[in-house]
Amino acid sequence: MAIGLATVGHILIIVAAIPSVLVNPNGALGSFIIGLVLFGCGVGLFKACISPLVAEQYEASHPRGYIRVEPSGERVIVDPGITISRVYMRYYMMINIGALAGQISMVYAEKYVGFWLSYLLPTILFVFCPILMLGLSKHYVKKPPQGDVVGKAFRLYGFAMRGQWSLNPVRTWKNLSSPDLWEGAKPSHLENKPGWMTFDDAWVDEVKRGVKACQVFLWLPIFWLPYGQVRSISRATFYSC
């Protein structure tokens, strides 16, 4: 479904950039807006599933690091965490290579042919995604869903914030930013823990790190908005030259 939405969005954006359609600016703009919304929804839906799918392809028989003795007698340290990090580094390296090649080549396609070609070429490559997924589906490691962790994380955060609020905003800020905020929410520190608390202390630490990461990523939209405008202005300047 997500790939279907993104494909339809791709097609509508191509249609909006065809010279015969650009004769009618209102129709072209409407097609472009609808296509952009569908494309964003489709990509947003399936892109969130790609990273977990990549991680699932590595099946570690040992959840923690161990020492493996080779037939030659060499002792090798096997660390699943480092292996997964290396997999993701290569994964994002290929994404960045594709983004660099696309940004360079599509600018020339826009300048010498038209925007419709710069939208058509990525669409052709994008269509191969469902074909590859269906063709190689039997080779993928597929794990059943383990439930929604977002809701449980919110409940944990609300549980940790109990008793931390005050009419004094300064005291409230200090309580919520205290490093001991999450210690009281760890199952090992509770005598009568709630029934929904089916995780261990390590999971609480992961949620804590996730909340801190969100505090950093919260500012990224502000960065990307002006950054995207700078790129658009630079591309328009190059195109006009």
Image (tube, rainbow, N blue to C red):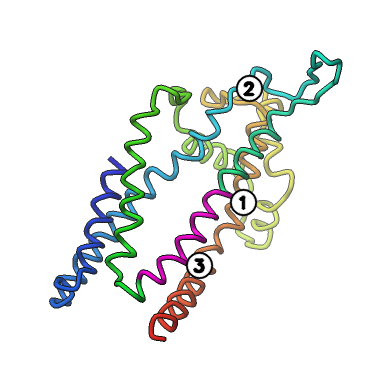
- Nearer the observer: mark 3 or 1; the answer is 3
Above or below, 99 relative to 76:
below
User: Residue 118 at what x, y percent from top left?
Assistant: 34, 64
Callout 2: SS: loop
- Mark 1: secondary structure: helix
Q: Earlier in the sequence, mark 1 or mark 2?
A: 2
What x and y, as percent, mark residue 43?
37, 49
Kind of residue at disc 3? Trp
Total marks shown come to 3
Give the residue drawn at x 16%, y 75%.
26
Q: Which mark is residue 224?
A: 3
Is 238 left, or right, of 180 in this rendering? left
| Disc on res. 60 | 2
Determine whether label 1 and label 2 are within 8 Å by CB: no
Decide whether the magenta segment is chiefly helix, strand or loop.
Answer: helix
In this view, the mark in front (1 or 2): 2
**Residue at screen point 54% across, 63% down:** 220
Residue at figure coordinates x 64%, y 35% from the top left = 84
Q: Nearer the viewer, residue 138 or 231?
A: 138
Q: What is the residue that sits farthest to the top in this orientation?
A: 71
Residue that numbered label 1 is attached to = 213
Q: Which of the 4 image quadrants contains residue 115?
A: bottom left
